[in-house]
Image (cartoon, coloured by chain):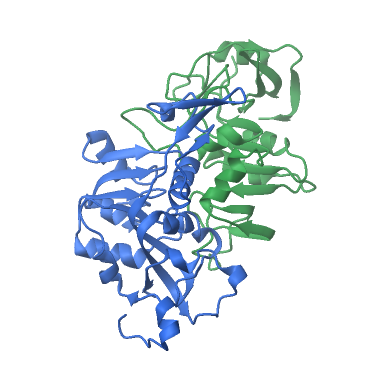
Amino acid sequence: MLGVDLGNEEERLVQKPIISAAEAAGKAREGMTVHVGGFLGCGSPASIIAALDELGTGGLCLVSNDTGLYDVKAGRATGVACLVAKKRFARIVVSHIGTNPETQRQMNSGETAVVLVPQGTLAERVRAAGAGLGGFLTPTGVGTEAAEGKETVRVGGRDFLLELPLPGDLAFVKAKRADRSGNLQYARTARNFNPLMASACALVVAEVEEIVEIGAIDPDQVHTPSIFVDFLVRAAP
Amino acid sequence: MIEYVENKEIIARRIARLFKPGDVVNLGIGLPTLVANYLPEDVTIVLQSENGMLGLGPFPSPGLEDKDLTNAGGVPVTVMPGGCCFDSATSFGIIRGGHVDYATLGVLEVDQEGNLANYKVPGKMVPGMGGAMDLVAGARVVIAATTHLDKSGASKLRRRCSLPLTAAGKVSLVVTDAGCFEVAGGAFRLLEWFAPYDPEWIIARTDADIDATGARRSELAC
């Protein structure tokens, strides 16, 4: 716990350390499966991604909805696009790369292994990992390439694909607000994959815009329970 | 022969007339997004956005964008009064669970068996399926929105899709700028045509089986 008032003994037990974005990025090691929240940059942990970019860690396996928006001409890169451009990922598991031509290029040239997963299946696989499920049956992808290599299970005369959980070693998520115990609240559509990933990874770092005292968030308004969160990072303004 | 001129507006206008008040509708990126501009005044529908919202509203005025409120294309939007936000698992539970009445999607190819291909041209364009496979699997009615011909003049409606499928046999309605079709009995059944096109033109220019029995001229025209 760095430079924070630890309070009394009882309080300290449930407080989560507040670390810098650089310290958060340092938790990612080559070969790890890293879940990164966000949807085309909305609800992405931008400060941690920038620190990871600076640190230069490579050989990561990314699980995310997309690889951000990458527009070389306009000089615009959102989400993890800057990390893709520097080939920091050995493997990318996402639902959509249409807004990042560099990911498409790396996929087509074979430079990076890119696995495309239907968005709802991706979300549910992450959720399943966090919820202790051995998998689930979905109608999505039946009769398409997404069914290749998967077991088809017939229930009530209808075909479903058996999809398996997708856990991670590390999650970088983004929330609007945290309390010191790690309870998280998201804003609007910035929620997306963040709460699912917070439940599915061994180590969870939440980048937040505001950190409030324990008790300041109404229990009914907590989106991610504190027990899922290990570290907090203040988002750069 | 009537010369073909692409007209995305009439596609959006026709689709907008399909909805009843209270319908839950997901509009895909691109052409389907235009549909929201043509909803009749007296029809209030609930737009679902797969990134986690019911009650998708119009684009905000410049300067009023909220970085935490976007559509599935990552573009800033607004949320209607009574709207709500949720995570991606809930969003796709809504979609797969049959709670979305209509999904409107763009098309690379659509065929007379109701197969849809819209996410991949192997080796060339690989945007990924995003939420399209779930939407097509779960929505009550799947509407394919497409220009009738592509840039080279080839039919977008096919006998059999040649590209990787987004879903097999799930499309029930196809709306082009030449007409409105129902996928039934292994053919595109023409419901309405948009003047100046007519059934003769549509049959001649479509690389698929067209059943024009009972078709009528739409009150909409190109």
Chain B rendering hue: green
Q: Position of residue A184 (x, y in %)?
A: 49, 68
Residue B22 lies left or right of residue B152; in this view the side is right
Residue drawn at x 65%, y 12% is B185
In the image, B96 versus A14, the foreground residue is A14
Furthest residue toward right: B42
Residue B75 lies left or right of residue A17; in this view the side is right
Q: Position of residue A203 (x, y in %)?
A: 34, 61
Vertical placement of residue A76 versus A153, above or below: below
Total label count?
0
Q: Position of residue B139 (x, y in %)?
A: 62, 35
Look at the image and tell me in which quarter the N terminus of chain B lies: top right
Furthest residue toward front: A10
Look at the image and tell me in which quarter the C terminus of chain B lies: top right
* Residue B8 visible in the displayed image: no
Residue A13 lies left or right of residue A185; in this view the side is left
Vertical placement of residue A173 versus A95, above or below: below
* Residue A84 visible in the displayed image: yes
Vertical placement of residue A218 versus B221, above or below: below
Chain A rendering hue: blue
Residue drawn at x 51%, y 49% is B72
In the image, A181 versus B138, the foreground residue is A181
In the image, B2 versus A112, the foreground residue is A112
Residue drawn at x 60%, y 74% is A218
Q: Position of residue A156 (x, y in %)?
A: 62, 25
In the image, B98 versus B221, the foreground residue is B98
